[in-house]
Image (tube, rainbow, N blue to C red):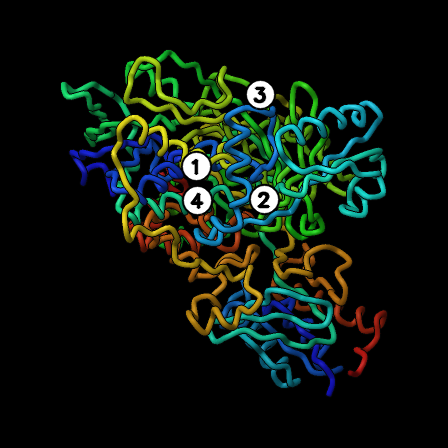
C-alpha cells in the first residue's frame, strides 16, 4: 500500500495538482466546501472538465471536510460526519488566496464597524441590500472590481484606493501609510502619500487588495513546513491559468523531489 | 435583557460596570441570597479594559504588603479550579524575565527580592538556563528570572463566564444601560437611572473602570480622578507563536514594566503593552510609530519575531488613577463601594469579589449562601483544544462544521456563543467568546458565515447585523 498524496483545496490549483500527481500514485483531494471548483465555482465548463479529468485518473475526493492539522505524515480531517487522520505521502496546500488584512497593510487608527474584507462584502452584497452610501474599496485584488460593481449597482458611490482601478467613481493612489477613523462606525480613511495627506469621508471600507495565500492547516502554514508543498501562486488569477500553473508546480515537484517513498 | 424590558428593578446590590471586576462581583453575589443587578453602558459585557489586555493572570505584580498583592496571592492558586468550573481557557505557563545587558541584570536583583517579598516564587537563571527554557530568547540574554506561577488566561472568556454564571443564578443584566443619574432615596437606598431603566439598590458597586470617577460624582461620592492609559498591542500569528512556551517579561524599570511577549490561550502571542496617558476614554486608536516600537521592543527579547508575523494591532484603555487599586467604601456616600484596578483586574478578580462580599456583609447586607446556586457552567468544549475531535463530533455534528478556518472554531461553538446566558449580539461578540475571526486572515474566510449566523439569532439583516457592540456592518 502506498500512502496517497493529500491535496487540500479543490479549486483550479488543487485540481491541476491532482491531475499530475494522480498519474504517479493515489491522490486524495480535500475541500471544506461540499463541491469542487473553489472560488471559480463548480459549474463552469472548464472546472467540470478538470473534475472529470481528475476523477478519471482515479483521484478520490473528500468534499465537505476540513483539514485541521498536519504532523508531517498524517492529516487530521473533520466534518459533521466525524474526525480522522489520513496517512499521506505529502501535503499539497492549494487553499487559494485571501485579501490583505489591516495588519498586512500596517493600517492603524480606530477599529470601528464597517471595515470588512472583500470576500465578506461579496457575500453580503449578494443579498442585494445597499450597505453603504460611500464605500472605499482599497486595493486591486481580484475581488475589487466585482465588489465595486455590485455596490454601484445598489446606488453606492465607490472610491478606489488603487493605482489603476477603472471601476470606481473616484480614485486615489495607494498611500505610504493609511489609517481608519470612526468610533462606532467608520467615518473615513486617511491616506498619507508622497502628494501629502488625503482624508476621504466614507461609511464603509472594503479590503480588496494584495492577495495573500490562505493558510489554515496547523503545521502547514510557515515556509519550510515538513512534507508540505504550497501551490498558491499570486498570479495568474483566471481558472485556466491557475490550473496550468498548479500542473507545472506538481511536475516540478516530481522532478526535484521524486516520487513518494512507498510505505 | 434589553433596558426597555426592565423599567424598574429593586435589588440589594447594583453593580455598575460589566468588565472583569463588575462581572466577578456579580457572579460572587449571585451565589448568595442577595438580589443583584448588573448595569453596563455598552451593548455587551467586556467592552473596555477587560477586552484589551495581555491576558496574564499574574502571580507577581508588586509592591509587597499592599491589599492588591494580597488579593493577587489569594486568587493565584485557584485559577486551574476556577477556570475548569467556568470553562475558561487558562495555562500556567510560567514566565521568564530577561535581562539583556548588565544594567538590566543589576535590576533583576531588587526585582527578585520584591517578588519574594510579595510571597511569590522566583529563581535566578543563568543565560543558558533562560534559553533552555525558552530557546527563542535573544542570545544577548545575560541573566534571567523564572517565575513559575505566572499564567495566561482568556480575559474575554473569563468576563463572559463570570457574567454568564451571574445570569444563570438570576442576576438581572442590563446592557446598553449607561448610568445617567444616581440619587438617594428617603430610606437610604440609591435610585439609578441607566438607559431606560430605573434601579433602586441598597448598595452600589462602582466597577466602572475608567468611568469610575463619573459614577462617584453622580452618586455624590468622593471626587475621584480616573483617566485612560492607552496600551497598544500587536498580535503574532500562532503558527509562529506556538514555538513559545513561557511568558517573556522584559526587565522592569522604576517607571514601567515594559513590553512583554505573552503567549495566549489561543496559541497566538501578544506583544505589548505600551502606556500613554491621555484624556479621551473613547480613543482606542493605534499609530504606526507605537506599533513599530512595540514590535521592535518585543524583537529585542525574541529576535525571531518579525513584522510579517503580526496579524492584528489593537489598543485599549486601562483605568489609571492616583490610587492604582481602589476597593473600599466611599468616604461620603456610605452605600457606594468602589471596585477598580489599573492593570491587575483579571488577576485580582476572584479574591476581589470575595472581598466585596465581606465588605458588604460587614456593612449589613445580610446575605447568606444560597442553596442550589450554581458555581460552575456547563463545559464549553472547543474543537481546537480537543485531543479527540471525533468524540465532540459524535456528541454534536456541528463541532465538525468548521466556520473559522484559521482558528478552527466550529459552528457548535458559535451557536453556543449566540445562545448562551449572556449571548453575543455581534460578530465581535462571537469573536470575544470563541476566538473566531481572530486568526491570520482576520475574518476574510469566515466573517460572512459568522455574520449570517449572528443575523439569524438576532433577527438582523445583512446591512443591520452588528459587527461590533457599537456598530453595524452596513450603515
What residue would you read off at disc 1?
B20
What residue would you read off at disc 3?
B276
Q: CA–CA distance between discs 3 and 1?
A: 22 Å
* Circle nearer the N terminus (2, 4): 2
Secondary structure at badge 2 equals strand
* Circle nearer the N terminus (4, 3): 3
Q: CA–CA distance between discs 3 and 2?
A: 24 Å
What residue would you read off at disc 4?
B428
Q: Chain of mark 1?
A: B
Contact? badges 1 and 4 (CB < 8 Å):
no
- Which of discs 1 and 4 lies nearer the camera? The answer is 1
**Height in image: A137 above or below B208?**
below
- Mark number, residue B152: 2
Observer-nearest of A241 and B412: B412
- Which of discs 3 and 2 lies nearer the camera? The answer is 2
The crowding category of the residue bearing disc 1, from other C-alpha atoms within 10 Å (few below 14, some 14 to 19, many at least 20), is many
Amino acid at each position: 500500500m502506498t500512502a496517497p498524496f493529500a491535496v487540500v483545496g479543490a479549486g483550479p490549483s488543487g485540481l491541476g495538482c491532482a491531475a499530475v500527481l494522480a498519474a504517479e500514485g493515489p491522490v486524495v483531494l480535500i475541500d471544506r466546501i461540499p463541491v469542487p471548483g473553489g472560488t471559480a465555482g463548480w459549474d463552469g465548463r472548464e472546472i467540470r472538465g478538470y473534475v472529470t479529468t481528475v476523477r478519471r485518473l482515479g483521484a478520490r475526493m473528500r468534499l465537505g471536510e476540513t483539514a485541521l492539522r498536519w504532523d508531517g505524515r498524517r492529516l487530521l480531517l473533520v466534518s459533521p460526519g466525524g474526525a480522522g487522520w489520513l496517512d499521506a505521502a505529502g501535503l499539497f496546500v492549494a487553499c487559494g488566496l485571501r485579501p490583505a488584512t489591516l495588519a498586512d497593510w500596517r493600517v492603524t487608527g480606530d477599529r470601528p464597524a464597517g471595515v470588512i474584507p472583500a470576500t465578506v462584502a461579496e457575500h453580503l452584497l449578494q443579498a442585494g441590500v445597499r450597505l453603504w452610501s460611500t464605500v472605499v474599496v482599497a486595493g486591486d485584488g481580484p475581488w475589487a472590481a466585482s465588489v465595486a460593481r455590485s455596490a454601484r449597482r445598489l446606488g453606492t458611490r465607490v472610491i478606489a484606493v488603487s493605482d489603476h482601478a477603472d471601476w470606481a467613481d473616484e480614485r486615489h493612489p495607494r498611500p505610504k501609510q493609511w489609517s481608519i477613523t470612526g468610533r462606532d462606525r467608520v467615518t473615513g480613511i486617511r491616506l498619507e502619500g508622497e502628494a501629502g495627506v488625503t482624508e476621504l469621508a466614507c461609511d464603509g471600507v472594503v479590503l480588496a487588495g494584495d492577495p495573500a495565500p490562505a493558510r489554515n492547516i496547523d503545521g502547514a502554514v510557515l515556509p519550510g513546513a515538513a512534507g508540505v508543498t504550497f501551490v498558491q501562486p499570486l498570479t495568474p488569477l483566471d481558472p485556466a491559468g491557475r490550473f496550468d500553473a498548479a500542473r507545472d508546480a506538481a511536475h516540478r515537484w516530481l522532478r526535484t523531489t521524486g516520487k513518494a517513498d512507498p510505505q | 435583557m434589553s433596558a426597555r424590558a426592565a423599567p424598574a428593578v429593586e435589588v440589594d446590590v447594583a453593580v455598575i460596570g460589566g468588565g472583569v471586576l463588575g462581572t466577578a462581583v456579580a457572579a460572587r453575589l449571585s451565589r448568595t441570597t442577595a438580589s443583584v443587578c448588573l448595569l453596563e453602558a455598552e451593548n455587551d459585557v467586556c467592552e473596555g479594559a477587560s477586552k484589551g489586555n495581555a491576558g496574564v493572570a499574574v502571580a507577581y505584580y508588586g509592591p509587597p504588603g499592599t491589599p492588591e498583592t494580597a488579593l493577587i496571592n489569594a486568587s493565584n492558586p485557584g485559577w486551574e479550579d476556577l477556570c475548569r468550573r467556568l470553562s475558561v481557557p487558562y495555562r500556567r505557563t510560567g514566565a521568564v524575565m530577561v535581562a539583556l545587558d548588565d544594567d538590566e541584570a543589576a535590576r533583576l536583583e531588587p526585582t527578585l527580592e520584591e517578588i519574594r517579598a510579595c510571597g511569590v516564587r522566583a529563581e535566578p537563571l543563568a543565560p543558558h538556563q533562560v534559553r533552555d527554557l525558552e530557546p527563542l530568547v535573544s542570545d544577548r540574554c545575560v541573566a534571567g528570572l523564572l517565575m513559575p506561577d505566572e499564567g495566561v488566561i482568556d480575559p474575554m472568556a473569563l468576563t463572559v463566564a463570570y457574567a454568564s454564571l451571574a445570569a444563570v443564578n438570576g442576576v438581572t443584566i442590563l446592557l446598553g444601560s449607561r448610568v445617567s443619574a444616581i440619587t438617594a432615596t428617603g430610606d437610604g437606598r440609591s435610585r439609578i437611572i441607566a438607559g431606560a431603566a430605573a434601579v433602586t439598590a441598597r448598595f452600589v458597586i462602582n466597577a466602572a473602570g475608567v468611568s469610575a470617577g463619573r459614577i462617584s460624582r453622580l452618586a455624590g461620592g468622593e471626587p475621584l480622578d480616573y483617566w485612560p492609559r492607552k496600551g497598544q498591542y500587536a498580535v503574532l500569528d500562532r503558527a509562529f507563536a506556538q514555538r513559545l512556551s513561557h511568558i517573556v517579561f522584559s526587565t522592569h524599570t522604576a517607571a514601567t514594566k515594559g513590553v512583554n511577549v505573552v503567549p495566549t490561550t489561543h496559541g497566538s502571542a501578544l506583544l505589548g503593552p505600551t502606556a500613554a496617558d491621555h484624556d479621551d476614554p473613547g480613543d482606542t486608536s493605534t499609530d504606526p510609530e507605537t506599533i513599530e516600537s512595540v514590535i521592535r521592543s518585543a524583537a529585542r527579547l525574541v529576535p525571531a519575531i518579525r513584522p510579517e508575523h503580526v496579524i492584528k494591532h489593537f489598543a485599549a484603555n486601562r483605568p489609571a488613577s492616583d490610587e492604582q487599586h481602589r476597593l473600599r467604601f466611599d468616604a461620603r456616600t456610605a452605600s457606594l463601594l468602589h471596585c477598580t484596578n489599573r492593570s491587575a483586574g483579571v488577576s485580582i478578580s476572584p479574591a476581589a469579589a470575595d472581598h466585596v462580599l465581606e465588605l458588604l456583609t460587614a456593612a449589613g447586607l445580610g446575605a447568606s449562601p444560597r442553596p442550589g446556586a450554581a458555581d460552575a457552567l456547563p463545559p464549553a468544549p472547543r474543537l481546537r483544544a480537543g485531543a479527540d475531535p471525533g468524540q465532540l463530533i459524535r456528541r454534536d455534528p456541528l463541532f465538525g462544521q468548521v466556520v473559522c478556518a484559521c482558528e478552527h472554531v466550529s459552528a457548535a461553538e458559535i451557536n453556543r456563543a449566540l445562545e448562551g446566558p449572556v449571548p453575543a449580539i455581534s460578530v465581535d461578540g462571537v469573536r470575544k467568546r470563541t476566538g473566531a475571526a481572530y486568526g491570520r486572515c482576520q475574518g476574510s474566510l469566515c466573517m460572512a458565515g459568522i455574520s449570517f449566523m449572528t443575523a439569524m439569532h438576532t433577527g438582523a439583516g445583512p446591512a443591520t447585523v452588528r459587527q461590533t457592540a457599537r456598530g453595524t456592518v452596513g450603515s
